Image (spheres, coloured by chain):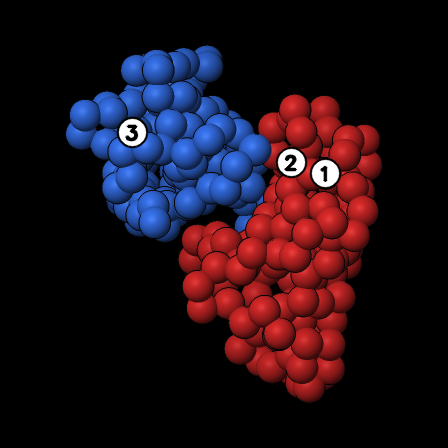
Chain colours: A red, B blue
Amino acid sequence: GAVVSQHPSWVICKSGTSVKIECRSLDFQATTMFWYRQFPKQSLMLMATSNEGSKATYEQGVEKDKFLINHASLTLSTLTVTSAHPEDSSFYICRVSGANTEAFFGQGTRLTVV
Amino acid sequence: GENVEQHPSTLSVQEGDSAVIKCTYSDSASNYFPWYKQELGKRPQLIIDIRSNVGEKKDQRIAVTLNKTAKHFSLHITETQPEDSAVYFCAASKTGTASKLTFGTGTRLQVTL
């Protein structure tokens, strides 16, 4: 089946720094990428949806200037958490779909801000 | 927007018993309802899904039922095994597998020996 690779799987960063998370589709063209955030023992909450070559659409309450999404190619989307703070510590996960494929989750990234 | 409620939040069953998890959705336009199993620290894994033109679907020990009129759908796991222990999420979307999903709040299933 289709493979989605997300990196890094975990990252620890200092408060105030930025962290970039990559999500790659390895064997299909990713026309749409969904970025989710999951706090411990909670559900997956959609942060934003991005289509290749277009600006991301953010969900209500998600700061677009803090969570920068770039989907410049059909195989790669990145989420950058800028000026991270401890409250941004969470599990971030991408979900990728192609033009004629079902959607697949990446492995997820555990972000810890200290 | 869509709102998906899920019950119970925790469920403990003995090995071999059945487990049932229920979800309700708010948007009558939703037409695709997947169920995911998530183990700690891992990505959600699709275990079964159902579309609005079908009332029931079964895959070995797992089945899903859908009542469009009442806007609720349920996951049934029979002959539970310890490896079924995980968090289960229901979800709903309007336009199929590749579209935006709204997730339920999750059910932590514990299968005891």
Mark 2–mark 1 Cα distance, whole angstroms, equals 5 Å
The residue located at (62%, 74%) in the rendering is: A65
Nearer to the camera, A85 or A54: A54
Mark 1, Cα crowd under 10 Å, few <14 / some 14-19 / many 20+, is many
In this view, A55 is above or below A86: above
| First of labels 2, 1 by sequence position | 1
Residues marked 2 and 1 touching at CB (< 8 Å)? yes
**Residue identifier under label 1:** A30
Q: Which chain carries label 2?
A: A
What residue do we see at 74% from left, 71% from top? A19
Left/right placement of residue A11 relative to residue B28 reads right
- Labels 2 and 3 within one chain: no
Q: In this view, does B17 lie above or below B100?
A: above
The mark closer to the camera, 1 or 3, is 1
Q: What x and y, as percent, mark residue A66?
A: 62, 74
Q: Do labels 2 and 1 share a chain?
A: yes
Q: Position of residue B16 (x, y in %)?
A: 36, 24
* Residue type for callout 1: Ala
Hey, what amino acid is under mark 3?
Answer: Phe
The residue located at (42%, 45%) in the rendering is B102
Label 3 SS? strand
Relative placement, left or right, of A110 versus B56 is right
Mark 2 → mark 3, Cα distance in angstroms: 24 Å
A29 to A7, vertically: above or below: above
Q: How many C-alpha atoms fall within 10 Å of the one at disc 2: few (<14), some, or many (≥20)? A: many
Instruction: Indicate which disc residue B70 carries.
Output: none
Residue hosting label 3: B73
**Which one is in front in this view, the residue at disc 2 or the one at disc 3?**
2
Q: 10 Å neighbourhood of mark 3: few (<14), some, or many (≥20)? A: many
Give the CA distance from mark 1 to mark 3: 30 Å
Residues marked 1 and 3 touching at CB (< 8 Å):
no
Q: Which chain carries label 3?
A: B
